[in-house]
Image (spheres, grey):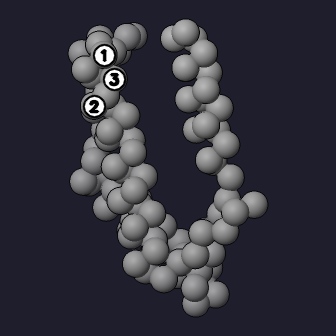
Amino acid sequence: MKKIFIYLCLLFLTSCATGSWESGSGSNSSLENDWGYCSSLARLRFPGYICENPLMCRPDEFNKVLDQIIQKKATFQNCMYRKGNIYREN
């Protein structure tokens, strides 16, 4: 049952990975600046959790790692939207 759950999670995560950001103003330099700023902001707020044993996380640590990843992505997306950029599905 655990293997099925893990495969479904991986399938879900990879299916969400398609798309690209476009600048609302049409300027590529503006998009690159926004990308850099928002990436730095997300890394600053959620630097990432590293497990005590890098080869295998405990269940409570696994939740912390997932929370950091989700919050970092949400912070990045919120920043990009606030800067006026648009996310397009491919």
In the image, what residue type sits under mark 2? Lys
Question: Residue at coordinates 39% horizontally, 41% vertically from top-left?
Answer: 69
Q: x%, y% of residue 60? A: 25, 20
In the image, what residue type sits under mark 1? Pro
Question: Residue at coordinates 37% horizontally, 34% vertically from top-left?
Answer: 66
Q: Is residue 88 left or right of residue 53?
A: right
Q: Please tell me whether mark 1 sits on a helix, a strand or a loop.
A: helix
Label annotation for residue 64: 2
Label annotation for residue 74: none
Instruction: Please rate how many residues cluster around mark 2, counting C-alpha atoms within 10 Å: few if below 14, some from 14 to 19, many from 20.
Output: some
**Quadrant in which the N terminus is drawn:** top right
Kindly indicate whether the residue at mark 3 contacts the one at mark 1 (C-beta within 8 angstroms): yes
Q: Which residue is mark 1?
A: 59
Q: Please tell me whether mark 3 sits on a helix, a strand or a loop.
A: helix
Question: Residue at coordinates 26% horizontally, 54% vertically from top-left?
Answer: 44
Q: Gap in Å between the C-alphas at discs 2 and 1?
A: 9 Å
In this view of the protein, which residue sits in the foreground, 53 or 66?
A: 66
Q: x%, y% of residue 57? A: 33, 15
